[in-house]
Amino acid sequence: MDLREGANRLKVAYTDVSGTLNYHRRDTLFGHESKTTIGWRTTKHLPNSGASEFVRVQEAGNAPLAVGERTRDFSYQGSDTVLHLGNDLELSFGRTTSSLGAHLEFAKGKRPTVPDAAN
C-alpha cells in the first residue's frame, strides 16, 4: 500500500499461520460454581515473509537514490505464543461472580535486514 505520505513506499508481503487450543472445565468449589479455562495461542510467520522499502519520490534525504530503488528489506521471521489461565468463581453475594486470570506471552523474531549497496 502506498499512502503517498513520504519519500519512500513500503511493500508488505507476509503470511502467517495461527492456532489456538483451549480447555474448559466446570467444577463445584466449596459449594460454588467454578469455570476454569486454560489455553494456548500461537502465530508463526512463514518463510519469505517481510517487507521492502523503495524510493517513491526524491527528496533531500534520499537524493542519490533513483525512484523505485530498494532501500531496505524487513524480515518477519518470528513467532508469538500466549499461554493463558482463567477462572470464574460464583460467589453467593447476590449471585456476584469473581474472575481471576493470567497469561504469559513469548515472542521472538529477527532484526530487519538492509540490502547491500550492490543490489
Image: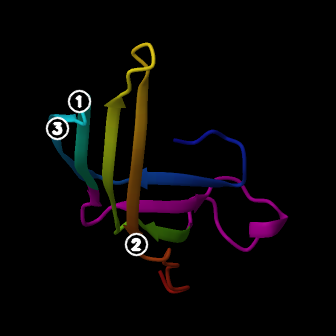
Q: What is the distance, in whole Å, between disc 2 and disc 1 at their CAs? A: 47 Å
Q: What is the distance, in whole Å, between disc 3 and disc 2 at their CAs? A: 31 Å
- Residue 31 image offset from top left, x and y in percent: 23, 29
Label at residue 9 = none
Q: Residue at x 32, y 40 (%)?
A: 87
Q: Quadrant of residue 97?
A: top left
Q: What is the distance, in whole Å, between disc 3 and disc 1 at their CAs? A: 19 Å
What type is the residue that disc 1 sits on? Gly
Query: Going from the N terminus, do you reach mark 3 or mark 2 first?
Result: 3
Element at label 3: strand
Q: Quadrant of residue 35?
A: top left
Circle nearer the viewer, 3 or 1: 1
Circle nearer the viewer, 3 or 2: 3
Furthest residue toward front = 30
What type is the residue that disc 3 sits on? His
Q: Which residue is mark 3?
A: 24
Range drawn in magenta: 43-70
Element at label 1: loop
Element at label 2: loop
Query: Going from the N terminus, do you reach mark 3 or mark 1 first?
Result: 3
Closer-to-camera residue (20/29): 29
- Residue 25 image offset from top left, x and y in percent: 15, 37
Q: Which residue is mark 1?
A: 31
Label at residue 109 = 2
Position of residue 4 in the picture relative to residue 83 (left or right) = right
Closer-to-camera residue (48/81): 81
Position of residue 118 in the picture relative to residue 66 (left or right) = left
